[in-house]
Image (cartoon, coloured by chain):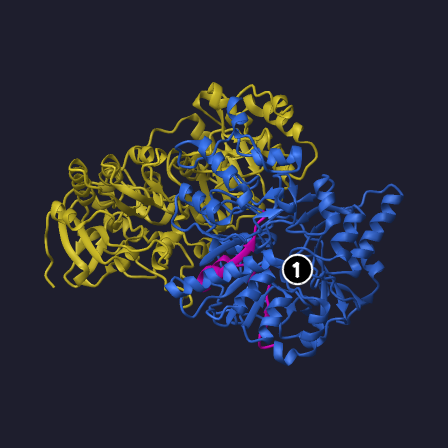
Chain colours: A blue, B yellow
Amino acid sequence: MALKFITAEEAANFVSNGDVIGFSGFTAAGAAKAIPTAIAQKAKAEHKIGNPFKIGVITGASTGDSLDGELARAEAISFRTPYQSHPDLRKLINAGKADFFDSHLSIVAQNIRYGFYGKLDFAVIEACDVTEDGEIVPTSSVGVSPTICNKANKIIIELNTAHPKELRGMHDIYEPKDPPHRKEIPIYKSNDRIGSDVIKVDPSKIVGIVETNRPDEVGAFSELNETTKQIGKNVADFLAHELRTGRIPKEFLPIQSGVGNIANAVLTALGENESIPAFEMYTEVIQDSVIDMMKAGHVTFASGCSLTVSPPMLKDIYENLDFFHPRLVLRPQEITNHPEVARRIGIISINTAIEVDLFGNVNSTNVLGTTIMNGIGGSGDFTRNAYVSMFTCPSVAKGGAISAIVPMVSHVDHSEHSVQIIVTEQGVADLRNKSPKAKMEAIIENCAHPDYKEQLWDYVKIGGEKHTPQTLAAAFGMHNKFAKTKDMKNVDWREYLHD
Amino acid sequence: MALKFITAEEAANFVSNGDVIGFSGFTAAGAAKAIPTAIAQKAKAEHKIGNPFKIGVITGASTGDSLDGELARAEAISFRTPYQSHPDLRKLINAGKADFFDSHLSIVAQNIRYGFYGKLDFAVIEACDVTEDGEIVPTSSVGVSPTICNKANKIIIELNTAHPKELRGMHDIYEPKDPPHRKEIPIYKSNDRIGSDVIKVDPSKIVGIVETNRPDEVGAFSELNETTKQIGKNVADFLAHELRTGRIPKEFLPIQSGVGNIANAVLTALGENESIPAFEMYTEVIQDSVIDMMKAGHVTFASGCSLTVSPPMLKDIYENLDFFHPRLVLRPQEITNHPEVARRIGIISINTAIEVDLFGNVNSTNVLGTTIMNGIGGSGDFTRNAYVSMFTCPSVAKGGAISAIVPMVSHVDHSEHSVQIIVTEQGVADLRNKSPKAKMEAIIENCAHPDYKEQLWDYVKIGGEKHTPQTLAAAFGMHNKFAKTKDMKNVDWREYLHD
């Protein structure tokens, strides 16, 4: 079957109001670009003449400005799942103008297959190569692309020459069968390959190919500062200690590390710590620091869902594919984040928290319990199934006006039952095998900022002798104080007792 | 090596203040009885002469009065994990006189092996048979017995003739290797057997055998009432509907069902619904209703961790082992509750909630956020990995003074990201692929009691336009009202806005 080349505008014209589209992309890496922008243009034109035009948007995770940014600014999104991080989209969601369904990333593909999301009209997939017999080679991420190709009625390809065809071989495409026919995910080491190097589709479903040459819209992370460096050092020291005691096996274990500056600082510190051997990563997002450490020999292999690296770093990888092909694999998020694999291979998970409470519950998503930041992403997939699960955050934010350690988190994404280790620049709280009161003491003494320790102890005292010494009437006293004064300090806990 | 028979008092005399003991038992089924009672006696005697005497207690889950009851009344417990349900122990914990570490049941065994719980001095195991070469046949539960036998320095057996030796063959004992050497758990169907029919230990570790003849201390459940019957019917109708739409495959899927009256009502309703085919159970606790349905042909096989059935039902099973041996298997809780297996075979999980909030978060453990009830048990293991995850509860308690549907749960055990279906006697809220606001509408309209609907809508209105319309200052208004007036009704939300 001959490939049919079309323009982005022609592709957008296939799409109708109310359609549900699955787009490639996991972070800005490998996200569709030209077609969502053209759809946004079409939406604006339709809105201008008074017609409704919104689509449902399913992706791997967040995407770039050409997808979430353009569609958000066009107010062209009816619902969005499973994760987002674009400021314009976040604003739209928090204003109630787009529905957002925040989901563990490992379950998105199976929920599509199970039919829980309803119909799927189109898959829009960025590829570095596509063949007439329906072999699609993804670019810098995999996300949910295999499943949306499989389940969508029609497929449109963005053939992006910014990614070389020689990427073929870096992907490991595997889609499990559904119950009651599912077998094991046969990964036993980070570098096991279990699938195909392409997404295979019925070529008659490919209704058009849009040629592009556009780089991934990956933003830069800011430089490390003293706080993030100290958090990184605390994580590395803790893991070195666990190795010495034998609680982590001498072979070490695969690292999963979240996204952002703290994650970069943690990886850098692991590389600098001489007690920690070179290690593998079984992670979600592969950032610049992973590639740097691979070149330095500290990371021997990385399995991930996306190459979310800066443009110069991606250029470096593409120019040295002989070095990187044997050291990198990109898999669907259903596999990178799969509970079965995470638990079997025994990952060490390191993710960031927005806030942590005295009893070890973690908020990763909702600021002040109401306003979505990005979403839970893969943090829950990893945390729940890790050998050791860690959360990191600076002890304070906004120049000290916000304490990340609060009596009760305003939204729970990871419960006390799954969270083992909390790390701030102040220190490390090991919550394993501790009662709520013992957790509380470890968190206040080791992780809270000195400016807040006394206030947190005062809170606990009003609770009296309970299994979990919360006082519901006062639990959000620090959040309420911030809402009123823009500072969490100087809460008078007594005022909550006289209601 | 000859078996050494001793008395329970001699066994207790091996135990010193500060020892950590792993006991057999998952619910009262198969729990050690004579030895913990003798240890409690020893503790009382020591306390009388002014000596400290407390032990750390690790079990499978809850146990019977002879273990948790006796040790609690003797104030002989320093810490207790992972689950309990005895009123005397609950009182001790909530009074701050024993530390309780509430844990997902699937991770207990691996945490013991990983060394996270520290030393393990003794394993005290109820058996129906034991051989000179170290083969131990458990009784009516498996729990964490294989792992505590493996890791404890010394083993003491309670050889209980109330359980017949012919039970041998009902257990499937399998202990995974630890990372980085772990392989798949090779269960693909509920009735796959993967291990040994005995726990094999180094016989030199068995320091004594105490002969007993004591029945399991399993309490009776109360009769079904109109509310629990209606909840059961709502669950069955929902699952029948999912079957019709094809979202559940035509073969149906294995059922996991929690403990108690609602679970019994749900299973009864599934049996009575003609649209639902005979099914298998891949569950934790096997209750009377499972056995009744097995005899009626509605349940074809049950895999579980314990036979928590009434004394006449256990007698019936023991007298008809030829019928039950091919239809029942008892496994370690690490396997019955394993995320890998639950997700692979696609269980339908049905567990009970203490309270549910408008955004789909579930509290299973802490009353008013402070007082432990029993613990999270296996509910988290199953919910997170289920094909469809359901929570059930009556919409009100205490004659209507407590609404199970609240603005914000006072403790989160299962987050919005994992909870799919809420069922009360009022109806069913399907939360899949819904934004927080859409979940809220479904829960209020379909699940809340009519007495509370208006009050819940009024709460939401004060939140205004947010992704998650919580108002932190008022979120526990219904809990606070109950604390003051013993009734959650007639909250004046406006008073929270004038702070």
Residue A143 lies, in percent from the top left, at: 63, 60
Report whether residue A471 is seen.
yes
- Looking at the picture, tell me which residue is in the foreground, A189 or B259: A189
Q: Which residue is mark 1?
A: A26
Looking at the image, is A36 positioned above or below residue A136? above
Look at the image and give the residue range highlighted in magenta: A325-354
Q: Is residue B69 left or right of residue A104?
A: left
- Residue B249 magenta-highlighted: no
Instruction: Count residues near mark 1 (Cα–Cα under 10 Å), then give few for <14, some for 14-19, many for 20+.
Output: many
- Looking at the picture, tell me which residue is in the foreground, A144 or A246: A246
- Looking at the picture, tell me which residue is in the foreground, A408 or B415: A408
Chain to which the residue tagged by mark 1 belongs: A
Looking at the image, is B138 positioned above or below residue A341? above
Looking at the image, is A390 positioned above or below residue B102? below
For image coordinates 58% across by 34% down, the residue present is A490
Kind of residue at disc 1: Phe
- Residue A326 magenta-highlighted: yes
